[in-house]
Amino acid sequence: MQEHLLTFEEQWTDEASGRTLPEFVLEELRGFLACGILARGFAHLYCDACGEHQVVAFACKARAVCPSCLGRRMNEGAANLVDHVLPDVPLRQWVLTLPYPLRFPLAFDGKLLGEVLRIFTDTVAGWYRARQADRGLPVGQSGAVTAIQRASSDLRCNPHYHTLFLDGVYAPDRDGRGQIFHPAPGPSQHDVEQVVHRARKRILRFLQRRGLITLVAAPGDGEVTVMGDESLGESDPLLARLLAAATVGVAPAGPARRQKPVRIVLDADDQPVARERYARRTRGSTCTRRAAWRPTTSRAARPCAGTSCARRSPTSACTSCPRAT
């Protein structure tokens, strides 16, 4: 991140044409670089009883890129759910993934992502209530908590829902003064397919009413093709382009697009500068094909085989390279 953030900002920012990254993206990335660094601020903790003291660096509290803050948030959230939210009853996880044509509009619009979640949870809760009625039990209510993930394991943009449902319903007890939990039988494959079919139908109908998609008949029995609204990203075309590329796993820039990145190195006072403006002076010969590097003195010098100069210490000369000048 330290090596390539400046390149990223430079490549995707053009104020003259109005092409700029959303500020929340830049704040998240810059905050991550300052996370846990004492020079950027800290709290000094002191115990009056034992005299022990400790300094704790400020955290960025990021929600997307910082593994430390994300891990802390995940652990705190899980502990809160277990200790204060979830009752001691059976639970079942329901996971809803979405087809490619729907991933971009939901990733682009957070409010829309929440409305689709409401439809999904209402569909599953309705299925639990229906099973309760089929068993001749009083009408009850279920509950759920959802964690929304915006990426898959390969870092493609893939918004999907992990929902923990109470595996049953709460209904009034015999005297009507309290609630009793009635566990539900395990769902069969047919039950899951019914829930998916119902949720799919409701979600597509909702998005179609909003004008975000168009259902086009496709070859096959009852098949449809989802066509997205191409004007959805006009309000923020740069963010839309990045999300669209991340959804299908296509590189929006770099070697795959034949766009040469800007080489960035760090100078002695840790200020990013362009490579062509960075002057390096060493004793002896220097390889002309050496890649960009960061100053360090902890690595031992190694002979260069022509193109592997990036592996040796920058404090020593490259004397065995045939391209030395």
Image (cartoon, rainbow, N blue to C red):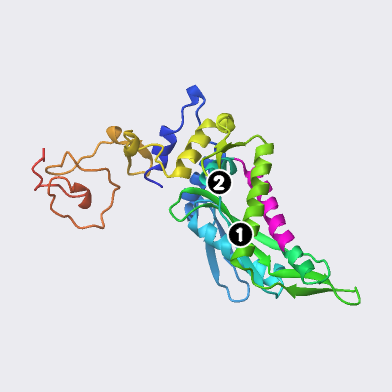
Q: Is residue 110 magenta?
A: yes
Residue 64 location in percent, x, y?
Answer: 53, 51
Q: Position of residue 7 (x, y in %)?
A: 39, 37
- Residue 218 coordinates in the image, percent (x, y): 53, 39
- Position in image of residue 66 (x %, y %): 50, 54
Query: From what the image shows, is residue 225 above or below residue 175?
Result: above
Please say if 173 is above or below 111.
below
Q: Could you tell me if the residues under marks 2 and 1 are in contact, i.e. CB atoms within 8 Å?
A: no
Nearer to us in this view, 177 or 9 = 177
Mark 2 or mark 1, which is nearer to you?
A: 2
Tell me the number on the disc at residue 193. Answer: 1
Relative placement, left or right, of 289 versus 66 is: left
Give the distance between the C-alpha atoms of the residues marked 2 and 1, in whole angstroms: 17 Å
Label 2 is placed on what type of residue?
Answer: Asp
- Work out whether residue 21 can be spotted: no
> In this view, which residue lies farthest toward the top?
16
Amino acid type at image mark 1: Glu
Q: Is residue 273 magenta?
A: no
Q: Residue at x 80, y 66 (%)?
A: 140
Residue drawn at (49%, 39%), measured in percent from left and top?
A: 244
Where disc 2 sits, the SS reads loop
Up-down relation of residue 15 to residue 39 (above or below): above
Q: Write down the quadrant of residue 180 in the picture.
A: bottom right
Residue 170 seen from this side: yes
Residue stretch rendered in magenta on the structure: 109-127
Numbered mark located on residue 14 in the image: none
Q: Quadrant of the C terminus?
A: top left
Q: Which residue carries the number 2 mark?
A: 221
Q: Residues within 10 Å of mark 1 (few under 14, many from 20)?
A: few
What secondary structure characterizes most of the magenta part?
helix
